[in-house]
């Protein structure tokens, strides 16, 4: 699978924007890290869809909510958002800086 990610219109969201959207029920957060990564730590309320097996057709129906992708640092989530956008999802969005930025902003995580 080959994509030209630099031509994408993926919108970067801050951790605060994503947290506000999650709290208000306006965001579906899709974590594209692998299961072994999310088993250690994840953003509460996020859904797991690893990039290694990512299929945009498997995304939940947005029903008026924004689908936002996340990963550890923002690289994989940008790729997933680009793939989803190319598949017709609409405006693709991702958590810029990923879980690292989320934690730096002092937002909560779930740990096993």
Image (cartoon, rainbow, N blue to C red):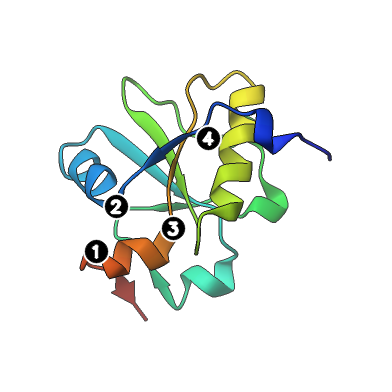
**Callouts 2 and 1 close, C-beta under 8 Å:** yes
Which disc number belongs to residue 59?
A: 4
- Lower position in the chain sequence, tag 2 or tag 1: 2
Q: Which residue is mark 1?
A: 105
Q: Which residue is mark 2?
A: 15
Cα separation, mark 3 vs mark 1, equals 11 Å
Q: Secondary structure at mark 4?
A: loop
Q: Which residue is mark 3?
A: 98
Cα separation, mark 3 vs mark 4, equals 19 Å
User: Few, some or many C-alpha atoms within 10 Å of disc 3 (few <14, some 14-19, many ≥20)?
Assistant: many
Corner quadrant of residue 28: top left
Cα separation, mark 2 vs mark 1, equals 7 Å
In the visual, does 76 lie left or right of 28? right
Residue 8 at x, y percent in the picture: 61, 29
**Residue at 56%, 61% in the rendered image:** 33
Q: Considering the image in quadrants, where does the N terminus appear?
A: top right
Residue 2 at x, y percent in the picture: 83, 38
- Lower position in the chain sequence, tag 1 or tag 4: 4
In the visual, does 108 lie left or right of 52? left
Q: Secondary structure at mark 3?
A: helix
Cα separation, mark 1 vs mark 4, equals 27 Å
In-front residue for pair 88/8: 8
- Lower position in the chain sequence, tag 2 or tag 4: 2
């Amino acid at each position: 699978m080959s994509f030209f990610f630099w031509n994408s219109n993926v919108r970067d969201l801050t951790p605060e924007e994503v947290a506000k959207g999650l709290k208000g029920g306006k965001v579906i957060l899709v974590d594209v890290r692998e299961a072994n990564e999310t088993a250690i730590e994840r953003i509460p309320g996020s859904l797991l869809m690893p990039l290694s097996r990512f299929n945009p057709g498997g995304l939940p129906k947005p029903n008026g909510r924004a689908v936002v992708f996340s990963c550890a640092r923002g690289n994989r989530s940008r790729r997933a958002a680009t793939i989803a956008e190319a598949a017709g999802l609409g405006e693709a969005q991702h958590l810029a800086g990923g879980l690292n930025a989320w934690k730096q902003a002092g937002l909560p995580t779930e740990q096993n």
